[in-house]
């Protein structure tokens, strides 16, 4: 078997800082408990059947809960949700015992919470694949809700707003 040479972890991280991504919070509820975490890796996989994926750090509480509960919801946060992203990233865990306190959500007990204002993808776990330090969780989308607001994005270590180009500047080379 041929041995591959990889870039360093630091080089990889620096390059990934230049990739903009929507800020998402993955939530779950069920026998393993009600948990949520800010996640940077979320993507559409297929429209036939509707499938998405999220990457969760293997061994994390959210990864274990999603696997056990068999359900999760991807909440694509609207542009004014910096504080929610920080809360679910664990930045306030020393102040708040439950990340959901004060966060308006839809959904009954045992159902993965949908954060109000977010565009949501409610999923049943289809398969879980281990890839490096993370689990790639594929979910079959059973319900969606369009928040109708531009998403919060993350680029180079900071939150950003999506700013549409005007039709006058589209297609012009500067």
Image (spheres, rainbow, N blue to C red):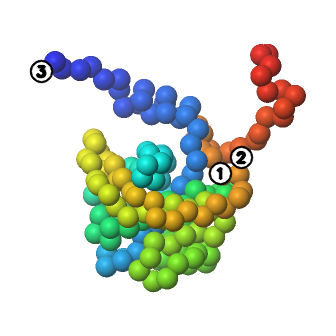
Q: Are marks 2 and 1 in contact (CB under 8 Å)?
A: yes
Q: Is residue 163 left or right of residue 128?
A: right
Residue assigned mark 3: 1
Q: Quadrant of the N terminus?
A: top left
Could you say which is closer to the camera, residue 83 or residue 114? 114
The answer to whether one can see residue 47 in this image is yes
Furthest toward the bottom, the residue is 109
Residue assigned mark 1: 152
Q: Which mark is residue 161?
A: 2
Q: Secondary structure at mark 1?
A: strand
Of badges 2 and 3, the one in the foreground is: 3
Looking at the image, tell me whether mark 2 or mark 1 is earlier in sequence order: 1
Could you say which is closer to the camera, residue 20 or residue 74? 74
Q: Is residue 90 left or right of residue 84?
A: left
Q: Measured from the top left, where is residue 133 in percent x and y?
A: 29, 45
Furthest toward the front, the residue is 48
Q: Measured from the top left, where is residue 119 in percent x and y?
A: 61, 60
Q: Quadrant of the C terminus?
A: top right
Residue pictured at 58% horizontal, 47% vertical: 22
Query: Quick one: label 3, few (<14), some, or many (20+) residues within 10 Å?
Result: few
């Amino acid at each position: 078997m041929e041995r591959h040479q990889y870039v360093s972890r630091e080089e990889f991280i620096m390059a990934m800082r230049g990739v903009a991504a929507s800020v998402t919070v993955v939530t779950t509820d069920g026998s393993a408990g009600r948990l949520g975490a800010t996640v940077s890796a979320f993507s559409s996989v297929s429209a036939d059947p509707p499938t998405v994926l999220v990457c969760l750090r293997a061994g994390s509480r959210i990864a274990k809960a999603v696997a056990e509960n068999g359900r999760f919801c991807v909440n694509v946060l609207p542009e004014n949700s910096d504080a929610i992203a920080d809360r679910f990233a664990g930045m306030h865990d020393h102040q708040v015992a439950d990340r959901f306190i004060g966060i308006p959500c839809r959904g009954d007990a045992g159902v993965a919470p949908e954060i109000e204002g977010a565009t949501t993808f409610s999923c049943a776990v289809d398969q879980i694949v281990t890839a490096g330090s993370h689990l790639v969780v594929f979910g079959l989308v059973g319900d969606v809700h369009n928040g109708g607001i531009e998403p919060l994005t993350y680029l180079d270590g900071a939150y950003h707003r999506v700013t549409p180009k005007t039709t006058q500047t589209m297609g012009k080379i500067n």
